[in-house]
Image (cartoon, rainbow, N blue to C red):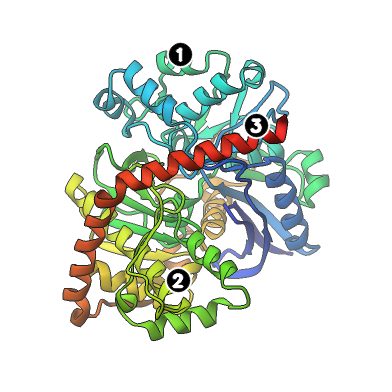
């Protein structure tokens, strides 16, 4: 029998799993696509039961006789809010991470109640925003009090999978550090005064590190998934941090740039860096710190455009976007189609396409979308460095790295090189790597629950740089720098110059949605 590890990630648009051997070779992979629910503008939800159903289906598809699965790694989108009763039964759909912007009133109220942005930033590493868990809990309490009254446990996709696999109710420290304002990032523990104020009846989970063994596969879970009973399951973490691990971008000075449904940036810093327009968090490994940013959408816009354009497929659209050329024939887009997270933290921002004429085609619009995300990446990078970050190396990962156009546009607009690794599978591969460390001789499969895998673990197959060496480097074209600098200046002007109109339209959208909801329930 051959030793393998299983890594599974629950993402925004799909769940992905990989079966990996001790040398890092992907032996098999499996994907299950899904959709999130958007019942109102600003709401983004998902049935948490789908996470387990898709994990079980992926596991059964990947694991066969002859595979000696030595450990399981998990990760998932986050921070999310899945509330259950004390028996682990979900009480409502999970509220997703910062793309769900419903809790704007709660953000303002909790910020006032707890002493303002600076007080929260000092204790939690991040100010309150749509990314934070606390305001979402307060929203449920205010709008669905019956559900909150029954709520006893808080899960995210990775911790939900751990619970269903092992029965252990835990959360990793990185995920907890995005539960602002419930968690103290310096003390590395729940901050009871604020947690008790927001959700007094919630039994917050014990805290572990992503590399800790959270428990072992139960007999019931083994029957549902086809996994062997008793194998260890690591705690895992939020997908972007698992993705950073997957491409060896978790060292000080590294920036992981994740091309996905949303664009996400994780910069590993030497010591804590805090600023109100980005997220300061614990890293994936004990003792590490991150400064992170995330756009509300990126690949989501390209997918939306593909649907609007009907029969066009991605290769065709990329070809036409390439033919459009730098500057998209005079178009400029703001990519705020789902509000925006960092660095403007404006849930009522809206998408703008400026410069349209009757001569523009779909390739020009698609090119403008790719450039818009690159302009947003530059804005985030500049914000990170202004806050005290020091970016020395950028590593690109995710589905958007397939093909050369999008990554080249990002390098051209930011003026930064990007290293593209051999494998850009993403978070599921990072989860498999962390599981592989748990199965290494330094942390045998029979290690007790809660034992930690040291970051410097050694042995065959535990070096991620060996698992996933560099493939190539994307280098910016210096001949485009002046034109793109001018476009970036226009980009930075376009948002403040249209903000009032965007907000007025957002209010109209909310009113229309509420009116429709009232009619549908009359």
Q: Report the residue at 20% width, 53% height from top.
A: 390
Residue picked out by circle 3: 518
The correct choice, above or below, for 462 with respect to 114 in the image is below
Q: Which label's residue is closer to the chain start, 2 or 1?
A: 1
Question: Label 3, label 1: how many angstroms apart (C-alpha)?
Answer: 32 Å
Residue picked out by circle 2: 401
| Element type at mark 1 | helix
- Which quarter of the figure has residue 96? top right
Q: 377 and 302: which one is in front?
A: 302
- Which quarter of the figure has residue 8? bottom right
Q: Report the residue at 38% width, 82% height from top.
A: 324
Q: Which mark is residue 16?
A: none
Q: Report the residue at 29% width, 71% height from top.
A: 411
Return the x and y of residue 69 as percentages of the image width and height: 69, 56
Question: Label 2, label 1: how many angstroms apart (C-alpha)?
Answer: 43 Å
Question: Which image quadrant: the C terminus?
Answer: top right
Q: Are marks 2 and 3 in contact (CB under 8 Å)?
A: no
- Is residue 452 among what the camera can see? no
Q: 431 and 182: which one is in front?
A: 182
The correct choice, above or below, for 227 with respect to 126 in the image is below
| Element type at mark 3 | helix
Return the x and y of residue 333 as percentages of the image width and height: 35, 63
Residue picked out by circle 1: 197
The local crowd at label 1, few if under 14, some if 14 to 19, many if 20 or more residues have their Cα within 10 Å, is few
The correct choice, above or below, for 422 with respect to 32 in the image is below
Return the x and y of residue 257 as percentages of the image width and height: 38, 60
The local crowd at label 2, few if under 14, some if 14 to 19, many if 20 or more residues have their Cα within 10 Å, is many
- Is residue 205 among what the camera can see? yes
């Amino acid at each position: 029998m051959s030793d393998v590890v299983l890594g599974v990630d629950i993402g925004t648009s799909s769940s992905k799993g990989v079966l990996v051997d001790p040398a890092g070779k992907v032996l098999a992979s499996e994907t299950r696509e899904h959709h999130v629910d958007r019942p109102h503008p600003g709401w983004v939800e998902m049935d948490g039961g789908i996470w387990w159903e898709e994990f079980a289906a992926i596991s059964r598809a990947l694991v066969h006789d002859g595979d000696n699965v030595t450990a399981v790694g998990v990760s998932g989108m986050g921070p999310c809010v899945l509330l259950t009763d004390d028996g682990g039964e979900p009480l409502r759909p999970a509220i997703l991470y910062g793309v769900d912007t419903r809790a704007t009133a709660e953000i303002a109220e909790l910020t006032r109640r707890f002493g303002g942005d600076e007080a929260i930033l000092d204790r939690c590493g991040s100010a309150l925003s749509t990314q934070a868990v606390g305001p979402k809990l307060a929203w449920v309490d205010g709008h669905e009090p019956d559900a909150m009254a029954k709520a006893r446990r808080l899960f995210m996709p990775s911790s939900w999978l751990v619970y269903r696999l092992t029965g252990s109710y835990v959360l990793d420290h990185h995920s907890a550090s995005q539960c602002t304002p419930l968690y103290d990032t310096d003390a590395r523990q729940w901050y009871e005064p604020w947690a008790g104020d927001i959700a007094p009846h919630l039994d917050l989970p014990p805290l572990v590190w992503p590399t800790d063994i959270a428990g072992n596969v139960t007999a019931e879970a083994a029957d549902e998934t086809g996994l062997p009973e008793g194998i260890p399951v690591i705690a895992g973490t939020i997908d972007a941090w698992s993705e950073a691990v997957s491409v060896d971008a978790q060292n000080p000075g590294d920036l992981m740039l994740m091309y996905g449904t949303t664009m996400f940036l994780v910069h590993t810093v030497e010591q804590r860096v805090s600023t109100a327009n980005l997220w300061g968090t614990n890293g994936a490994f004990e003792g590490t710190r991150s400064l992170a940013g995330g756009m509300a959408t990126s690949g989501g816009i390209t997918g939306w455009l593909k649907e609007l354009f009907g029969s066009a497929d991605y290769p065709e659209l990329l070809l036409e976007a390439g033919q459009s050329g730098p500057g998209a024939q005079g178009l400029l887009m703001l990519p705020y189609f789902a509000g925006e997270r960092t660095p403007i933290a404006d849930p009522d921002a809206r998408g703008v396409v400026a410069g349209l004429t009757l001569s523009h085609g779909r390739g020009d619009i698609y090119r403008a979308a790719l450039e818009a995300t690159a302009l947003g990446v530059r804005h985030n990078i500049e914000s990170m460095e202004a806050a005290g970050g020091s970016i020395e190396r950028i590593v690109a990962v995710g589905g958007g790295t397939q093909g050369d156009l999008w990554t080249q546009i990002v390098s051209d607009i930011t003026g930064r090189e990007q290293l593209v690794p051999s494998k850009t599978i993403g978070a599921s591969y990072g989860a498999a790597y962390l599981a592989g460390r748990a199965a290494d001789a330094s942390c045998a499969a029979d290690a007790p629950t809660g034992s930690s895998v040291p970051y410097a673990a050694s042995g065959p197959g535990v070096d991620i740089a060996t698992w996933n060496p560099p493939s190539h480097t994307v280098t910016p074209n210096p001949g485009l720098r002046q034109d793109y600098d001018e476009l970036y200046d226009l980009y930075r002007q376009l948002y403040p110059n249209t903000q009032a109109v965007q907000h007025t339209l957002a209010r109209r959208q909310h009113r229309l949605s509420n009116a429709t909801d009232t009619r549908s329930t009359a």
